[in-house]
Amino acid sequence: MKQDYLFDKEGNDAEVEGLEILLSEFRLANNLRPESNVIEFSRKSRSAVQTWVFAIAACVVLGTVFIGVWGLIWQGSAEMPLDIPRTEVQQVPAELADVRDTKTSLKSQDPPWLPQRVNSHAMRISASQQKYAAVDGRISKRYLKPKLTQEEKYAYNQVLLALSITSSKLRLVQDSINGVDQLKTNDK
Amino acid sequence: MFEQAGAIEIFTPRSATAEQNAVSPEEHLLVRLRAGDEDAFNEFYRSFAPMVHGILLARVPYDEVKDLVQDVFLAAYKHIGSLRDPYAIGGWLAKIARNRASEHYRTARRNEELPVEIEGKNERRSEAGEILAIILSLPETYKETLILRLVEGMSGKEIASRTGLKPESVRVNLHRGMEMLRAKLGIAAGVGK
């Protein structure tokens, strides 16, 4: 029966078969490649989503790390006395004049500003900085504070190094001034 | 009832008294699709792509069908989680295809040109285009079923299984649609003479 072929594809029907052959031009197999297009698209869409997820997660992790490091550095800089090198260097010339007038040797006596400044900031010097404290020998161990972080230690060492260099240069200047004054005195 | 046509399996509900504790192929397929199994998606595509292609061919111009088939399966892939009944996956996908075709007409200017106008490179293709144009002039229910049968080569049982229609409804649509097609072909043949 024609209807059987039309529904079940059983038997034969020349008219329907002819239409099938003719219209097969528009069949899916002639219009599309296999499922690779859609699979690739879905794979790309999924991979794109995954890429975005990983990118966002990486940004969050990096941002957290950055904030943590920045917080540590900020905390360390807040505890360190940043004003020691600059203010002391600026105050030296006036007080050196007082020292010069008293004609005291700088080698035997420290500049008056140094012990005061050190003592006032002695609370901030940690136990790990004793070797730097021993450079001028005036820092008391009882003023040692808890251990600093690596960044804080490095920054503090740099500050002390700058101070020692500055004090050495100032001593040279004072020696030269004292040498001139002695010459003048001898001449007299 | 189980049936195989070539490499395509027809998914039909199993009896409730048999293998109640076993997972049906439809349920297993749905679980795998939700899990993102690419092999399951390949299987899903191979089983339902002819149906989607035929539904779209009944509604949009031929040269736009292949892109819309991709859109339909992509939409199905994205919204597979919303499907609850694994046995309704065919009807659910058919609905997506029809909605996509309607959306295509809302967003794009309708092309009144027939496939024969666009693809007509030879006489054979021109004749096939004319017949397709006549099928497209039939009522929507008939033209969709006829395209699935005559263009995509699906049997009546396959059409029922894929689209979720009852086999008897498919039989009626095929019969009535074929009668109307014969009448119009006869008229067209008379005009051509």
Image (cartoon, helix red, strand yellow):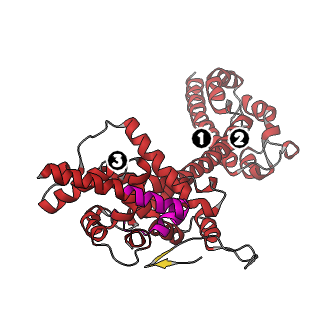
Disc number placed over residue A82 in the picture, else none: none
Q: Main secondary structure of the magenta part?
A: helix
- Looking at the image, do the residues carrying marks 2 and 3 touch, with CB atoms under 8 Å apart? no
Q: Measured from the top left, where is residue B64 in percent x and y?
A: 31, 50
Q: Residue at x 46, y 67 (%)?
A: B156
* Distance in Å between CA atoms under marks 1 and 2: 24 Å
Say which of marks 2 and 3 sits in front: 3
Say which of marks 1 and 2 sits in front: 2
- Looking at the image, do the residues carrying marks 1 and 3 touch, with CB atoms under 8 Å apart? no
| Amino acid at dot 2 | Gly
Q: Residue at x 50, y 55 (%)?
A: B94
The residue that label 2 is drawn on is: A76
Say which of marks 1 and 3 sits in front: 3
Badge 3 marks a residue whose secondary structure is: loop
The residue that label 3 is drawn on is: B60
Q: Which residues are magenta?
A: B151-177
Please rate how many residues cluster around mark 1, counting C-alpha atoms within 10 Å: few if below 14, some from 14 to 19, many from 20: few
| Amino acid at dot 1 | Ile
The residue that label 1 is drawn on is: A165
Image position of A45 (left or right of B19): left
Q: Name the quarter where the C terminus of chain A is drawn.
A: top right
Above or below for B10 versus A185: below
Q: Measured from the top left, where is residue B183 in percent x and y?
A: 29, 53
Q: Residue at x 31, y 36 (%)?
A: B109
Magenta stretch holds residue B166: yes
Q: Is residue B53 visible?
A: no
Marks 1 and 3 share the same chain: no
Q: Chain of mark 3?
A: B
